[in-house]
Amino acid sequence: MSARAPRSSPTTGDDGAAGLDPLDRPGAVRPPGAAAHSALANATTMFFLTGLLFFSAQYLQLVVGYSPLQAGLLLLPGFVVTVVAGLAAARLARRFALHQLVATGLALVLTGYVACLFLQVDSAVVLLMSAAVLIGAGIGLSETVTNDAILAAAPPEKAGAAAAVSETAYEVGAVLGTALIGGCCPRCTGGYVLSRRDAVLGRETLGGAADVATTMPADAAAALLASAREAFVHGWTSRPGRRRSSSPWCW
């Protein structure tokens, strides 16, 4: 009698050890060299993008006073430029090296953030829009070529795993941007906003100060909002040598 061959298990790897074969082998999932740097660049650009959205949405609505729809329309040119820069990156990649395009994209993002340092409570909105355009151009230029580099580094049968690496880098950057920048928001703002007993919430965030202001008399609410707006902008864009608010509502 001939021995019957054992049935193969769906979790059995090439070495015959059941349950030890991962969904994607680490060697195929981790792109080497320039592709790994591209994944890091993806995470970095998403970090800055979420930071811009976190700040600009509050600035436009709670500081300047635009509606959510108006704030979205004012930020729309930045996203349009992102699409245009992504399309242009495909042509530029034929003439310039990967590291040149990525460095240029990150430099544009950094330039946009430097422009945000000059924002004030009464600044023209065009300054923030220009910063958003610079950041959008840098993201579109960088992410287009980095995604291509990540996919090109993997064999065709692992293209899905390579795309997952790129997507994971996006998610990590977005989570870190939201967590770190969002966590810094109360620390940057709370030390300058109203310290009254009935406005503990107002010391946490600009939105909290706006909610507290709705329960206060008109004059006190106006003073609180003015202090909170100045504190918000000062906390986000503070630079050495800038004076702290002299408002009586601030510490």
Image (tube, rainbow, N blue to C red):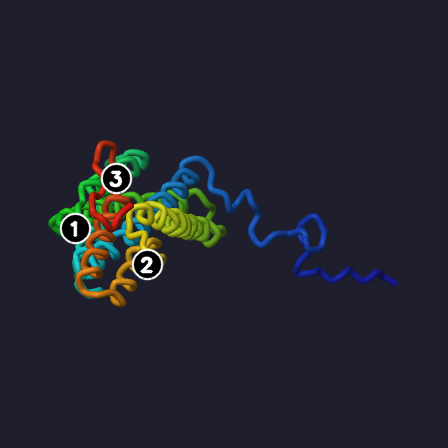
**Please, what is the three-letter code of the amino acid marked with disc 3?**
Ser
Task: Tell me which amino acid carries mark 2.
Answer: Ala
- Kind of residue sitting beneath label 1: Met
Give the Cα distance between marks 1 and 3.
20 Å
Single out the mark in the foreground, 1 or 3: 3
Residue nearer the viewer, 199 or 210: 199
Does residue 148 appear in this view?
A: no
Q: Residues within 10 Å of mark 1 (few under 14, many from 20)?
A: some
Horizontal and vertical percent position of residue 141: 26, 44
Specify the quadrant that holds the C terminus.
Answer: top left
Residue 199 badge: 2
Q: What's the residue at 41%, 40% (across, down)?
A: 35
x%, y% of residue 80? Answer: 20, 55
Tell me if label 1 and label 3 are in contact, CB under 8 Å.
no
Indicate the secondary structure of the residue bearing disc 1. helix
Q: Which numbered marker is on residue 129?
A: 1
Q: Nearer the viewer, residue 168 or 188?
A: 188
Q: Quadrant of residue 221?
A: bottom left
Q: Residue at x 35, y 54 (%)?
A: 204
Relative to 87, say whether 2 is above or below. Answer: below
Furthest toward the top, the residue is 241
Q: Earlier in the sequence, mark 1 or mark 3?
A: 1
- Badge 2 marks a residue whose secondary structure is helix
The earlier-in-sequence mark between 2 and 3 is: 2
* Residue placed most toward the observer, 11 or 111: 111
- Give the residue number, with chain letter if any, for mark 3: 238
